[in-house]
Image: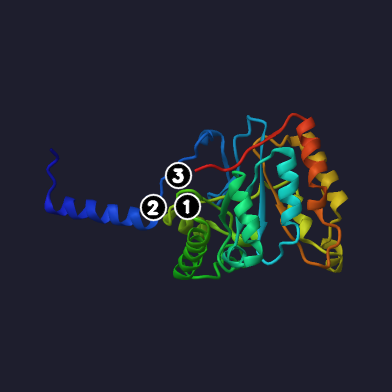
Amino acid sequence: MVNLSSSGFYILILYVFLCGTWGCGIMHHGQHNTERITVDETGAIVRMDSTQPYIYLIFSGHDHNEGRMHVLQTLTNLHIKASFFFTGEFYRNEENRSFIEALLHHGHYLGAHSDQHLLYVDWKHRDSTLVSRDSFFTDLLANYQVMESRFGITKDAAPYYLPSYEWYNREIVNWTTEMGFQLINLTPGPGTARDYTWPQMGPRYVPSQTIIDDLFRWEEGNSLNGVILLIHLGTDPRRHDKLYLQLEEILLRLQEKGYQYQIFKP
């Protein structure tokens, strides 16, 4: 039998309460070798085990969703699983319900992407946080609440979190950890996330074929082992050249090079 002082007893009760409310902040990476995971200067995971030929294919979704069924059908046909990160607004959109249920049925990972797709950090001054701690907690908690209430996705089942705009700083990473989650981001270099651009953006616009060429050129010099590869599930309607329409070509070419696909797991 363990004897506790009164102060020790109250500390234990507080710990149990906090764990039940927020989780204990201890991340279990399942099959992942945490010693070979790459984190950036803020503490975010930006690459998984770089010694193994696994690509972590991820998709994000907020207010554009036109590619959802094409992506689902492509992954299903190729027997590939991916990780999907959606905002609370995406989860609430009734138009997406059958799609999300199909993702769950096929065993894909579903996670959070900010409830309202907030911009957390100034674009030019990354050390300037634009939201308060309370606002961040409230927004992210709302994202997880709608995931559970509508689709039964618990916090324990979705510990990995992709920040909105894929833009954050150390403060945002620390707050995410406080809540018991792990912030992840795309691996810098491959460049597939540029598929959100459209022609009216001028020199910032990148056509899909250029994105694909850049991806395979980067792979030749760096390898894609453990890379977190982001493709958007939908884009601005002004972009007619949708990268997700070439998803099958990309995935098959990568498989021919010996890569396999892995999802994030609790």
Nearest to N terminus: mark 2 or mark 1: 2
Amino acid, disc 3:
Met
* x and y percentages locating residue 177 in the rendered image: 45, 53
Q: Residue at x 29, y 56 (%)?
A: 17
Contact (Cβ within 8 Å) of mark 2 with mark 1: yes
Nearest to N terminus: mark 1 or mark 3: 3
Amino acid, disc 2:
Gly
Find numbered disc 1 in the image and state the secondary structure of the residue it sits on: loop
**Mark 1 lies on residue:** 181
Whether residue 175 can be seen here: yes
Q: Is residue 242 left or right of residue 225?
A: right
Contact (Cβ within 8 Å) of mark 1 with mark 3: no
Q: Is residue 149 left or right of residue 11?
A: right
Q: Residue at x 86, y 69 (%)?
A: 200
How many numbered marks are there?
3
Mark 2 crowdedness (10 Å alpha carbons): few <14, some 14-19, many ≥20: many
Find numbered disc 2 in the image and state the secondary structure of the residue it sits on: loop
**Mark 3 lies on residue:** 27
Mark 1 crowdedness (10 Å alpha carbons): few <14, some 14-19, many ≥20: many
Mark 3 crowdedness (10 Å alpha carbons): few <14, some 14-19, many ≥20: some
Q: Which mark is residue 241?
A: none
**Mark 2 lies on residue:** 23
